[in-house]
Each structure stands twice: as structure tokens, then as C-alpha cells.
């Protein structure tokens, strides 16, 4: 599935040193909470025992002339450009990455804006190719990533939308695929497994069970379609009769057909 749009955006910094590891900017933010100067809110939060509220920033300091002034895009004293992109709501300064401020998200996202739409139910910006083609979960972006347990909505790491509608950080999703293929919340397949299921069909056909298991059946629950069915037991996997997925779990004890007892 396509990814969501991702969010954009120190003490002891040398004069004229531009930006930090997080942003390219020509000013320091004056934190309204502690009156300290930091390149960005992330640098602040990494060094203090409290968080900087980006929306309450009122003043910045130019890195060249060091004049403290009202937050704006260009220095009023020496005309230093603080950021190719500037949002006067989030007080985000950075190089131009086609950012845009989403009023519904309440923060800035990396665009271009025309490539994304805001899903009101999911409450986040999604790629246009997901419009009308994704499963909505109310306020899904306000939940923490189930892998790292950190915030998704304001994270600078791009989020990945699973077929089930749940979100993971893209980096967490990629790490998860090294160990498994299922959503950690609902166990639904996290990607299209059709090709692998058909390969598993061939392996099952080529691997006959011992005679004592050949007529054994089992009740299963499918994690992909949530359907229940009774199928022949096989050590390699039990295929859902409804959607043909092998992402199933045993839902009852094994039993042998009466005519074989």
C-alpha cells in the first residue's frame, strides 16, 4: 500500500552555522517554555525534560546577525533567509520540499499537496492513489505505532498503511517483514500474499500426510477474511475455504471423519 504524507519538522550552536540534523534553517527558535535558543523543537526536546510547543513560538534569533525578532521568513536586520519554506502556524523553517500545511492534520506535511488528500475518518493525509481504496479506521493516526510504540501522527518518519487500515512507521514495517507478514494488531496479512499462497498449494499437494492424518479435519479461523471453515489438517498449513488464504489459526480440536473411524 502507498504511504501517508509525513510531517516536517541548539544551544551552543556557533554563529553562522546553519540548521541541524533535522532541518536546514537560518535561525534559532526561542523556546517560550524556557527562553532557551534551539535550532528546532526536536533538538530542544532531546536536551530538555519538557517539550517545546511549536505553535507557541513567537521569536527567533538570526544565525548571522544574532538579532532576536518576531518569527518570520527573512531577517529584518540582515535579510538572511531563515527558510525556503516557512509556516507561520507551525513555525517550521526548512529548505523547499514541497511542504504544505494541512489544517485538518494541524501540522505541515511533505507534499506536493496535490499528491495527497486528507481522509476525515482516518484523520490523516494519504496518497491520492488510496482515495476510495483504503480501509478507514477512525483517528488511526492518533494511535502509536504498534511496533515501536511511538507517535505516528507527528513523526518525521513516513507511515505505511496496511491493507487492514492500521498504520506502522515505514521503517518499522520494513523491519517487521524480516520476521513475519501479519499486522501486529489484527493479524491480517500486511501485504498481498496471493503468490505465496499458490506456491504453498503446490507444496501441500507434493507433501502427503501420513495415513493416520490423511482423513483428519480441523476447524479454522481465517485472519484475512474472518471466516470459519472445516478443512483437512496439514502440517504445512490449512487453507481457508472462503478466501484461499493460509493465514489461518486452528479454532477447534482435530477430528477424524466418521467413515474412516
Image (cartoon, helix red, strand yellow):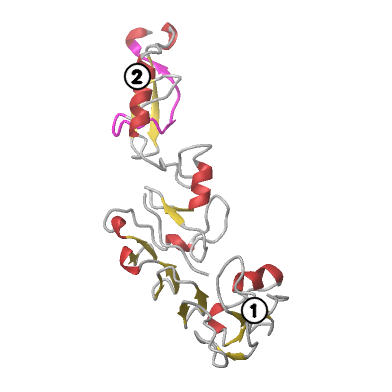
> Percent from the top left, x then y, of residue 77?
57, 93
**In this rendering, is residue 181 above or below 147?**
above
Asked whether the beta carbons under mark 1 and mark 2 sit within 8 Å of each other, the answer is no
Residue at 42 percent across and 63 percent down: it is 139
**In the current view of this chain or complex, which residue is farthest to the right?**
12
Residue 253, compared with residue 211, is above or below; it is below
Residue 28 at what x, y percent from top left? 62, 80
- Picture quadrant of residue 118: bottom left
Q: Which residue is mark 1?
A: 16
Residue 49 drawn at (x, y percent) = 71, 71
| Residue at disc 1, secondary structure | loop
Q: Quadrant of the C terminus?
A: top left
Instruction: Say if the magenta span includes residue 18.
Output: no
Q: Residue at x 49, y 40 (%)?
A: 177
Q: Main secondary structure of the magenta part?
A: loop
Residue at disc 2, secondary structure: helix
Which residue extends farthest left?
Answer: 132
| Residue at the spot of label 2 | 202
Q: Which residues are magenta?
A: 241-258
- Of the two numbered discs 1 and 2 on the same chain, state the one appearing first in sequence: 1
User: Label 2: few (<14), some or many (≥20) within 10 Å?
Assistant: few
Amino acid at each position: 500500500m502507498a504511504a501517508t504524507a509525513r510531517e516536517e519538522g541548539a544551544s551552543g550552536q556557533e554563529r553562522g552555522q546553519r540548521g541541524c540534523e533535522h532541518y536546514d534553517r537560518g535561525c534559532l527558535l526561542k523556546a517560550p517554555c524556557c527562553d532557551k535558543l534551539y535550532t528546532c523543537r526536536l533538538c530542544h526536546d532531546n536536551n530538555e525534560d519538557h517539550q517545546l510547543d511549536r505553535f507557541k513560538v513567537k521569536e527567533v534569533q538570526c544565525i548571522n546577525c544574532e538579532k532576536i525578532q518576531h518569527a518570520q521568513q527573512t531577517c529584518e536586520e540582515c535579510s538572511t533567509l531563515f527558510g525556503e519554506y516557512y509556516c507561520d502556524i507551525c513555525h517550521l523553517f526548512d529548505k523547499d520540499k514541497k511542504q504544505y500545511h494541512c489544517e485538518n492534520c494541524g501540522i505541515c506535511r511533505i507534499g506536493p499537496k496535490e499528491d495527497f488528500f486528507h481522509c476525515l475518518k482516518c484523520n490523516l493525509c494519504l496518497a491520492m492513489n488510496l482515495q476510495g481504496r483504503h480501509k478507514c479506521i477512525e483517528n488511526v493516526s492518533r494511535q502509536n505505532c504498534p511496533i515501536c510504540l511511538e507517535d505516528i501522527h507527528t513523526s518525521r518518519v513516513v507511515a505505511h498503511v496496511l491493507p487492514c487500515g492500521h498504520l506502522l512507521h515505514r521503517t518499522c514495517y520494513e523491519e517487521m517483514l524480516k520476521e513475519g507478514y501479519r499486522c501486529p494488531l489484527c493479524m491480517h496479512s500486511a501485504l498481498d500474499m496471493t503468490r505465496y499462497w499458490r506456491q504453498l498449494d503446490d507444496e501441500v499437494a507434493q507433501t502427503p500426510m501420513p495415513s493416520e492424518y490423511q482423513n483428519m479435519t480441523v476447524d479454522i479461523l481465517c485472519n484475512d477474511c474472518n471466516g470459519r471453515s472445516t478443512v483437512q489438517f496439514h502440517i504445512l498449513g490449512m487453507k481457508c475455504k472462503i478466501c484461499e488464504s493460509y493465514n489461518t489459526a486452528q479454532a477447534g480440536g482435530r477430528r477424524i471423519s466418521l467413515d474412516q473411524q
